[in-house]
Image (spheres, grey):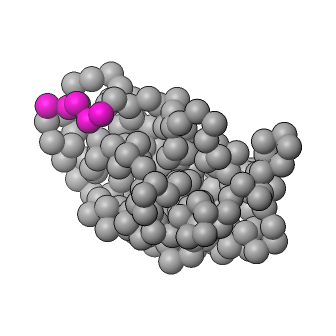
Amino acid sequence: MSKPTLQVIVASTRPGRVGLPVAQWFERFAERQDAFEVELVDLATVALPLFDEPNHPIARQYTSAHAIAWSETIDRGDAFVIVHPEYNHSYNAAIKNALDYLHAEWNYKPVGFVSYGGVSAGVRAMTALKPVVAALRMTPSVEAVNIPFVGQFIDDDGRFVPNEQLEMGAAGMLAELARLEAALRPLRAGAPA
């Protein structure tokens, strides 16, 4: 049996964002753990406009090429890690928009969070995201990676260089996501298309 697919979603879309190097580190780290096939999904590249579909996402009757492509992308995923900043004590608009575009494609899949920011390490944004993903029938991991004062981990070449504690947190979250993915797989198999 092939390995399940973990999609690492880069939530920030702004120029100069720290989220991309954080996500690239996490992608490489997850590949080394070898529990998943890993795919980086960058919302800046996906470039979804503000939700513009005429039908409710639960119907899966998409009319635009971008919504159809987004549906196909997320359908490929068996588990997700959302790498996200904290804006004004909450999550950024791009990740909310990306989540809202779809419904069934997210159902019965586990999700982990790599949050980053200043003193709060993005925890307030992660806390605000949890009820959103729960409404989409996703199962949030209890384990998370929260990066305080994220700038201290960016080297002169713009790469994210984690410390041992962040890597330990990432390993714990990946192990939990693998267990959750296996447990939720039968629910996905029986879910209506």
Q: Is residue 117 left or right of residue 74?
A: right
- Give the vertical position of 66 relative to 5 (above or below): above
Residue 21 in sight in this render: yes
In the image, farthest residue toward the right: 156
- Give the vertical position of 90 relative to 171 (above or below): above
The location of residue 138, given as percent across then percent down, is 37, 63
The location of residue 167, given as percent across then percent down, is 75, 68
Q: Is residue 193 left or right of residue 25?
A: left
> Is residue 34 inside the magenta stretch?
no
Q: Quadrant of residue 68?
A: top left
| Residue range highlighted in magenta | 50-54
Residue at 56%, 75% in the rendered image: 143
Overall secondary structure of the magenta section: loop
> Is residue 53 inside the magenta stretch?
yes
The location of residue 43, given as percent across then percent down, is 49, 37
Q: Nearer the viewer, residue 183 or 121?
A: 121
Residue at 51%, 37% in the rendered image: 13
In the image, farthest residue toward the bottom: 142
The location of residue 38, given as percent across then percent down, is 63, 48
Residue 114 in sight in this render: no
Q: Is residue 184 left or right of residue 103?
A: right
- Give the vertical position of 173 relative to 3 (above or below): below
Residue at 61%, 63% in the rendered image: 118
Q: Nearer the viewer, residue 3 or 60?
A: 60
Residue at 74%, 62% in the rendered image: 33
How many discs appear? Answer: 0
Q: Nearer the viewer, residue 103 or 88?
A: 88
